[in-house]
């Protein structure tokens, strides 16, 4: 790590001020991505603005929506019985992120802001037509993710909460990278009254994406068989030492069918 | 106190401190005025150092010194020595290019140390290292074992043409050729043994200290063998006489071989402490471990078996290319030769064997012994070959093994590749393992799995390995530059408690318990009154450390010898005290008795008399009850056994899931069954890691692609199943305890069992062989490329 100054503001306004005044300042949430980056000296922020004191934690269950504070940890999401009853897929997704230690530090806001192409939450946000609330505006998930590690957030903009539309049925299924346990292919499927939304993480060169061919087929017939014959072209998919683009293309179908089969 | 002697599953004495965070590791040690070293490493696989400017870094805040290879050379610092010399077929000694502590002129692998920055804090050292100005002229690199031998391949060392370190052989070529000429069938297999990164839980660390008053050096280091480090570093690298150099290896968090070797950082901190007259500490970060701890395995082999018509093995021919990496690590040359090719008989009575081994240099991290060291490579080759023979001939894989086993009544058995096995019973371990795994009932489980879309397979391996390294004269004649005896000093204190000083080293194996049980069993002293001391050259006698499952077989034998001396002396003291003849004194579990009487003295009576010799045979006997014994083994020991793996492959994803693993091992006499079970389970976990998950992958330019835990797949608990461990015993015939060793059997026996099971699961697909690791991605590709034979009509 390089030396940096450390601030822990008590209000969102103060945090935004600190971040806006200094383009080299950076927000810190759970640190599960950011601290490894600092340790490897891949970033050299002037000031770290710790969001830990902001009142951005908690899960609010509404009739048609669930709102989760940006600083809510994965462990809190994974252990919420109310959430499990309302959106089982989201609870399950959180329970599979990293390990116990990661889940007790890592946050919803941090995961979405980071938009790692192998992270899990972005697929849930897209599939549940989420609205990402920041200190200054609301951003639809469809507009939020803009490619690997890239989002619609402006410099200094802080996510405060995320509101998911509660689907009738949902599931998350993850084919894990054997080493890192991030997603090689993660599929979040959500059946809404007005159709199915299905998002894929881990596989796309441009990060998380919605699989429209699957969505159409599943909207007509919500069953694994409906998508069994739909191939995904490997052209825009990632290939690495763990999985070729062709393997990922194949896994997208397998994992999506398994997600649909267990959706509830 | 319950029974604590030989055979008791006593809880490990050391675990209370390890599990409660009170272990005392190298990085926990801090000395007043301590400085911190940061090693600047090459990010180039192969390059000439065109220029290296240190002035800016040296002037940075907090920096005390910056040193380069040139500074060390100017101070007459030697290169890192190699502890074993192999001679090629033609009698010429192996190529032994210099291994400078800090690079001189050239860097040869990513991670090669180039300079050291020493500062008041880690942070300052690291900051300053960014100010080093290094200009490299990149050279083409050679990364893989096979590429090293390509005509026109880049040469790693200018003086080693063709990158060949040695071209060695063993066995009777003419006899093997003749057997192949008359064979009814020849089965050939090409296979690789994948390269692994050891990944001990505790990263390496070293702290050099210099006493300005006495002029003594102390090195605290993460080592499996502090005396070996003192000898190598003192005599060859830094030229510090032994009386002025102390090496301490305190608690060490795992080694698996990777902490045997003398590493550059140990020499750097010790030398720098002397130069700067202040302590200097270095602790590896995990990414440094990946690029500087010696890697393991990395063989490419061709194996051929000549068979007669009924499947009897007539002769085995093996050609192996072994990757040494960029430099020779301390024991690297012996691993693919005397720890590998001598094991190629395995459990079989193959009458003729010939093996050729070429060791090559590449632009990769040095490769050396890793849990099993050579024997996993031999076992994998042989046990895969036997399954392929079964596949090609249609013979049953169990029957073909049985047919070729060395029968239990044939021991001692002389193999055609130098070793003489003293004992074993391979039918016994096979039978027990097949029963425990319900091998006979497997086909029903295969059918049931198929109904769920899973391909189920079962695999066995019947293995043998050599440990308890080793008779000094024998290894000396084979090129070892060290003796391999062990030593123990047993001190019975005045009030009867005991401290034993051993030359072996425990880095997780539980020696503090096992050795205490051994002493307790003989001396009748409860284990909490027995202290096992290891790891500090200023306390322990000159011993060789721990590797090759030698600690009990060799170090334990030295303890038995030392205790024999204690008992013999105790009898003389007892005879004096009880006014009896020495011949009439019997010793049993802490009591000296006059035979046929009710007169007796306790060990405490005797020890008190020995140290307070008021009533003592002082004319004939020195006071004290303190004996040292050296034990040089008569032979290797030969653990063996049978491992059975059952698994399922998800047809859609290719992912393997273990469903059962049974190990039945003959490790000789068992001192602590619980510790043996843990050692075998840990070894199997590593073997499963090699077979299914782990692989150190270099790209063709010499960059390590799997250079962190994000990309290097370590086995986790949920990759495993319950590993059922059984022991079936034959005693070692040549050491006093009858023990063989259990530290490596798990990692040796398991990889072929796993791959044999994978291949068995793919039976219908006509797969004959696949290389480790059997990842989901690899199996999916195989499933794609091959159709089930039945379905294809
Ligand atoms: C071993 C390990 C395994 C993991 N496995 C998985 C996995 O399987 N699946 C998965 O999805 N993730 C995984 N993660 C990542 C984990 O989920 C992280 O928690 C997440 O990526 C980042 O969240 P954080 O709260 O730790 O954010 P930080 O690391 O603190 O921050 C990440 C980035 O987001 C920015 N940021 C944080 N909060 C906000 C906010 N409220 N508004 C604006 N910007 C913000 C920061 O400035 C920084 O740039 C793993 C991490 C580790 C260490």
Image: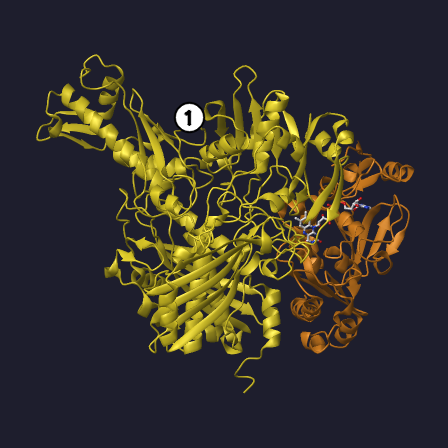
Chain colours: A orange, B yellow
Which residue occupies 44% across, 35% down? B14
Q: Position of residue A203 (x, y in %)?
A: 73, 63
The correct choice, above or below, for A6 with respect to B737 in the image is above
How many marks on residues? 1
Quarter occupied by residue B75:
top right
Q: Nearer the viewer, residue A169 or B246?
A: B246
The correct choice, above or below, for B249 with respect to B607 in the image is below
Quarter occupied by residue B348:
bottom left
Q: Position of residue B286 (x, y in %)?
A: 63, 43
Q: Nearer the viewer, residue B396 or B646?
A: B396
Q: Position of residue B242 (x, y in %)?
A: 46, 26
The correct choice, above or below, for B569 with respect to B170 in the image is above
Which residue occupies 40% across, 77% down? B185
On the image, numbered disc 1 is attached to which residue?
B539
- In the picture provided, is A40 more to the left or to the right than B407? right
Q: Chain of mark 1?
A: B
**Is residue B65 among what the camera can see?**
yes
Quarter occupied by residue B771:
bottom right
């Amino acid at each position: 790590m390089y030396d940096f100054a450390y601030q822990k503001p008590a209000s969102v306004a103060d945090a935004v001020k600190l971040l806006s005044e200094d383009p080299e300042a950076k927000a810190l949430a759970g640190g599960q991505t950011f601290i490894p980056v600092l340790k490897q000296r891949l970033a050299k922020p002037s000031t770290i603005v710790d969001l830990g004191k902001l009142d951005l934690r908690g899960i609010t269950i509404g009739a048609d929506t669930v709102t989760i504070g940006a600083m809510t940890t994965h462990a809190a999401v994974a252990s919420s019985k109310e959430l499990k009853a309302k959106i089982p897929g989201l609870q399950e997704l959180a329970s599979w992120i990293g390990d116990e230690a990661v889940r007790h530090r890592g946050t919803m806001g941090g995961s979405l802001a980071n938009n790692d192409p192998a992270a899990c939450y972005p697929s849930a946000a897209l599939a549940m037509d989420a609205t990402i609330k920041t200190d200054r505006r609301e951003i639809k998930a469809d507009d939020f993710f803009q490619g690997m590690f890239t989002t619609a957030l402006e410099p200094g903009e802080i996510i405060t909460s995320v509101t998911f539309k509660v689907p009738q049925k949902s599931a998350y299924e993850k084919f894990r990278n054997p080493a890192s346990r991030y997603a090689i292919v993660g599929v979040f499927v959500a059946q809404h009254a007005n159709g199915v939304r299905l998002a894929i993480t881990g596989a796309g060169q441009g990060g998380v994406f919605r699989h429209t061919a699957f969505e159409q087929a599943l909207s007509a017939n919500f069953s694994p068989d409906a998508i069994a014959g739909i191939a995904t072209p490997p052209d825009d998919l990632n290939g690495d030492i763990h999985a070729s683009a062709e393997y990922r293309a194949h896994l997208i179908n397998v994992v999506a069918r398994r997600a649909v089969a267990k959706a509830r | 106190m319950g029974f604590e002697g030989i055979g008791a599953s006593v809880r490990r004495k050391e675990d209370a401190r390890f599990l409660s965070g009170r272990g005392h590791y190298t990085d926990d040690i801090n000395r007043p005025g301590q400085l911190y070293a940061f090693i600047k490493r090459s990010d180039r696989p192969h390059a000439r150092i065109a220029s290296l400017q240190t002035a800016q870094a040296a002037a940075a805040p907090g920096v005390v010194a910056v040193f380069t290879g040139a500074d060390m050379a100017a101070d007459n610092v030697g290169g890192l020595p190699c502890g074993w010399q192999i001679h090629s077929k033609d009698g010429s000694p192996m190529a032994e290019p210099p291994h400078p502590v800090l690079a001189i002129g050239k860097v040869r692998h990513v991670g090669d140390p180039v300079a050291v920055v020493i500062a008041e804090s880690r942070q300052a050292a690291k900051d300053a290292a960014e100010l080093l100005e290094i200009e490299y002229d990149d050279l083409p690199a050679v990364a893989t074992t096979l590429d090293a031998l390509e005509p026109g391949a880049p040469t790693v060392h200018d003086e080693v043409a063709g990158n060949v370190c040695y071209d060695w052989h063993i066995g009777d070529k003419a006899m093997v050729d003749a057997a192949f000429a008359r064979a009814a069938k020849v089965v050939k297999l090409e296979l690789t043994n994948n390269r692994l990164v050891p990944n001990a839980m505790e990263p390496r660390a070293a702290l050099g200290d210099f006493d300005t008053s006495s002029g003594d050096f102390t090195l605290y280091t993460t080592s499996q063998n502090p005396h070996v480090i003192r000898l190598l570093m003192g005599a060859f690298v830094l030229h510090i006489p032994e009386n002025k150099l102390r090496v301490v290896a305190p608690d060490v968090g795992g080694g698996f071989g990777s902490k045997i070797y003398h590493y550059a950082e140990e020499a750097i901190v010790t030398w720098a402490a002397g130069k700067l007259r202040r302590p200097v500490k270095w602790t590896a970060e995990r990414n440094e471990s990946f690029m500087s701890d010696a890697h393991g395995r990395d063989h490419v082999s061709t194996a051929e078996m000549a068979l007669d018509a009924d499947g009897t093995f007539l002769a085995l021919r093996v050609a192996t290319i072994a990757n040494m990496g960029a430099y020779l690590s301390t024991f690297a040359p012996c691993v693919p030769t005397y720890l590998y090719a001598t094991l190629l008989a395995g459990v079989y009575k193959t009458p003729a064997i010939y093996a050729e081994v070429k060791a090559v240099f590449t632009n990769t991290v040095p490769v050396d012994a890793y849990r099993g060291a050579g024997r996993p490579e031999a076992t994998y080759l042989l046990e895969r070959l036997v399954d392929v023979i079964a596949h090609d001939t249609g013979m049953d894989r169990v029957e073909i093994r049985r047919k070729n086993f060395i029968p239990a009544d044939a021991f001692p058995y002389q193999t055609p590749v130098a070793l003489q096995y003293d004992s074993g019973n391979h039918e016994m371990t096979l039978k027990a393992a097949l029963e425990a795994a319900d091998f006979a009932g497997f086909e029903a489980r295969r059918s049931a799995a198929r109904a769920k879309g899973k391909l189920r397979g079962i695999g066995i391996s019947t293995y043998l390995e050599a440990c308890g390294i080793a008779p000094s004269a024998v290894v000396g004649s084979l090129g070892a530059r060290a003796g391999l005896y062990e030593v123990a000093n047993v001190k019975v204190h005045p009030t009867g408690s005991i401290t034993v000083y051993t030359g072996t080293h425990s880095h997780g194996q539980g020696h503090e318990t096992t050795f205490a049980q051994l002493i307790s069993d003989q001396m009748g002293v409860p284990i909490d009154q027995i202290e096992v001391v290891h790891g500090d050259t200023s306390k322990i006698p000159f011993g060789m450390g721990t590797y090759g499952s030698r600690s009990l077989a060799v170090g334990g034998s030295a303890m038995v010898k030392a205790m024999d001396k204690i008992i013999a002396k105790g009898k003389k003291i007892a005879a004096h005290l009880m006014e009896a003849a020495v011949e009439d004194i019997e010793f049993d579990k802490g009591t000296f008795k006059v035979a046929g009487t009710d007169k007796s003295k306790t060990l405490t009576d005797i020890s008190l008399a020995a140290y307070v010799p008021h009533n003592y045979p002082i004319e004939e006997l020195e006071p004290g009850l303190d004996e040292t014994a050296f034990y040089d083994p008569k032979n290797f020991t030969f653990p063996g056994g049978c491992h059975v793996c059952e698994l399922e492959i998800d047809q859609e994803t290719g992912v393997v899931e273990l469903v059962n693993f049974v190990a039945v091992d003959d490790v000789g006499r068992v001192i602590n069954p619980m510790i043996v079970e843990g050692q075998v389970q840990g070894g199997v976990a590593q073997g499963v890691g090699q077979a299914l998950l782990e692989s150190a992958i270099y790209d063709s330019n010499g960059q390590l692609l799997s250079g962190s835990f994000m990309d290097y797949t370590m086995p986790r608990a949920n990759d495993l199943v319950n590993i059922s461990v059984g022991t079936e015993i034959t005693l070692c015939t040549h050491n006093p305890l009858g023990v063989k060793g259990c530290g490596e059997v798990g990692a040796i026996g398991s990889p072929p069992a796993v791959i044999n099971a994978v291949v068995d699961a793919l039976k219908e697909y006509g797969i004959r062989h696949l290389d480790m690791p059997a990842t989901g991605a690899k199996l999916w590709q195989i499933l794609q490329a091959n159709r089930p034979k039945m379905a294809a009509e």
